[in-house]
Amino acid sequence: MEVTALAGRLPEAAADTIVVNLFQGVKQTDGATGAVDAALGGAISRLIATADFGGKLNETAVLYPPPGGGTGGGDVTATRVVLVGLGKREAFTLDRARQAAGTAARRARDLGARTVATVLHGAGAGGLPPRQAAQAVAEGSRLAVHRFEELKTAAGREEADEPPRHLQRVTVVELDEAKLPEIEAGLARGRIMAESTVFARDLVTKPGNILTPRALATAAQEMAGGVGLRCQILEPAQIAELKMGALMGVAQGSDEPARFIIVEHSPPGTGDQPPVVLCGKAITFDSGGISIKPSEGMWAMKDDMAGGAAVLGALRALAQLGVPQRTIGLVPATENMPSGRAIRPGDVLRAMDGQTIEIISTDAEGRLVLADAIAYGHRYSPAGMVDVATLTGGVVTALGHGAAGIMGNNPDVIARLQRAAETTDERVWELPLWEDAYKKAIRSDIADMKNSGGRAASAIAGGMLLKQFAKQVPWAHVDIAGMSWAESDAPYTPKGATGYGVRLLAEFAAGYA
Ligand code: BES
Ligand code: MN
Ligand code: ZN
């Protein structure tokens, strides 16, 4: 789907569907919505008068132009007009623009629309700068209509009553030609953010038999080649050479060989800059290993590489945006499987930096692969480091599906994450990593630490283990276990893989430029 901009009058735009909006409680249409209302012979005004449409956020109505046209001047050639509510004007936000764009695009798509001409949500009475509003419209529309279709046959789709409806183009139509350059710039940024998020979503959606560690490495390589990122893939021999004993320990139970993926964004002139390092957990399937998970819902553990996917998506976005900040993505990729060669509870592993970890649960594997990634990251002397992982069920208990848990050793990194989250509306909430209160959770009698402290504050125990590997590097950990997968549709996040973290990490890294 393309998102473009054009100067002109919205009612006469060449598209099969026109999208306009309304704030809650507004009695009189104006601006582009007013022009379309006039072209419809006052149909929107009548809708408001009947109170059939109140303008609540993400409320929609569909209207059809009368045969003779209205009193607006030109000819409405569109088949339909989709009206979307923006909610109360006082409560309007950038994210509401994203949501309204997503809601309208999906409604149009479901009606069979192929081309949409839309108002720039929030740029008028909403008070958003045109550039930001345009980015939100591009992100919202593109993210809302995304579907993973690779694994359904045409017959299967028909059977499921999912006609192959594809929205091909959304055009922002702006009366004031002078605003076009700003709008185009915002759309370009939004397109890249959205496409990079969709890239991550598709990786997360793909099941473990298809997206193996090798397949993930290949996908990273192809993506990197396409956008001009450097990419290096380490195979088991090189992983062993580096003494990444924690990653190797997790991988040893699987027939699928591990990969350590390194992606580098080094735009010209940034070669000797301290980089931002992003580490992403990529367990392509987490069975729990010998500490095996209950079978119910285990299929969902195909999403245990969502952190790695978010890192790859963010690097993709940074490359395409040409952000002048050196950034490195480190993605340790392996399955976590039980077998005669698998690690056992009680085993002790030695990570790359020499620290030893006693395995209490083989299901606490994410922190193991990340320990080696974080240790590896030290060689870059990072300006800031963030790891992203579907690390614990505990963070879902604490925060549900409303926010990722963040914790770290440096207030600046935390604050930067919080600021980025504010911009992208991918919410984060800080949990404490107090040594005196929580370090004992990972104390081991025979090794430097143990990998599980049981149920109490398990999200924090996970962060505490990672902290032992970050050492003096300014670092934060983002636990996305509650955010990587959505159980139901939201305005611009369809049910399934969310791509959470791509925009957040890209925005975070760009903040260092
Ligand atoms: N991948 C899981 C965490 C997870 C759980 C993600 C539920 C999404 C939904 C992780 O590897 C895991 O199994 N964590 C354990 C750690 C425990 C053994 C200390 C957990 O949270 O139960
Ligand atoms: Mn696990
Ligand atoms: Zn896991």
Image (cartoon, helix red, strand yellow):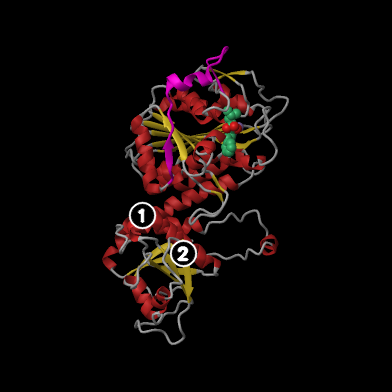
Q: Are marks 2 and 1 in contact (CB under 8 Å)?
A: no
Q: Is residue 61 magenta?
A: no
| Residue 108 showing in the rendered view | yes
**Image quarter of residue 165:** bottom right
Coordinates of residue 384 in the picture (x, y in percent): 38, 31
Mark nearer the viewer, 2 or 1: 2
Instruction: State the residue in front, 274 or 385.
Output: 385
Observer-nearest residue: 31 or 307? 31
Reply above or below: 83 against 383.
below
- Indicate yes or no: mark 1 CB to ligand 1 under 8 Å: no
Number of other residues with Cα within 10 Å of mark 2, as a class: few under 14, some 14 to 19, many 20 or more: some
**Identity of the residue drawn at 33% across and 38% down:** 512
Label 2, secondary structure: give it. Answer: loop
Give the mark, 2 or 1, whose residue is nearer the N terminus. 2
Which amino acid lies under the numbered mark 1 shown in the image of this protein? Thr
Magenta residue check for 447: yes
Disc 2 designates what residue? 59
In the rendered image, residue 486, in percent from the top left (x then y), is placed at 55, 48
Q: Quadrant of residue 138?
A: bottom left
Task: Mark yes or no: residue 16 visible.
Answer: no
- Measured from the top left, where is residue 243 in percent x and y? 55, 21
Q: Residue furthest right?
A: 340
Spatial CA distance of label 2 from label 1 is: 16 Å
Q: What span is colored magenta in the figure?
A: 426-451
Q: Where residue 1 sits in the image (x, y, percent)?
A: 49, 61
The quadrant of the rendered image in which ligand 1 is seen is top right
Amino acid carrying mark 2 in the image = Glu
Return the residue at label 1: 93
Give the structural element (helix, strand or loop) at label 1: loop
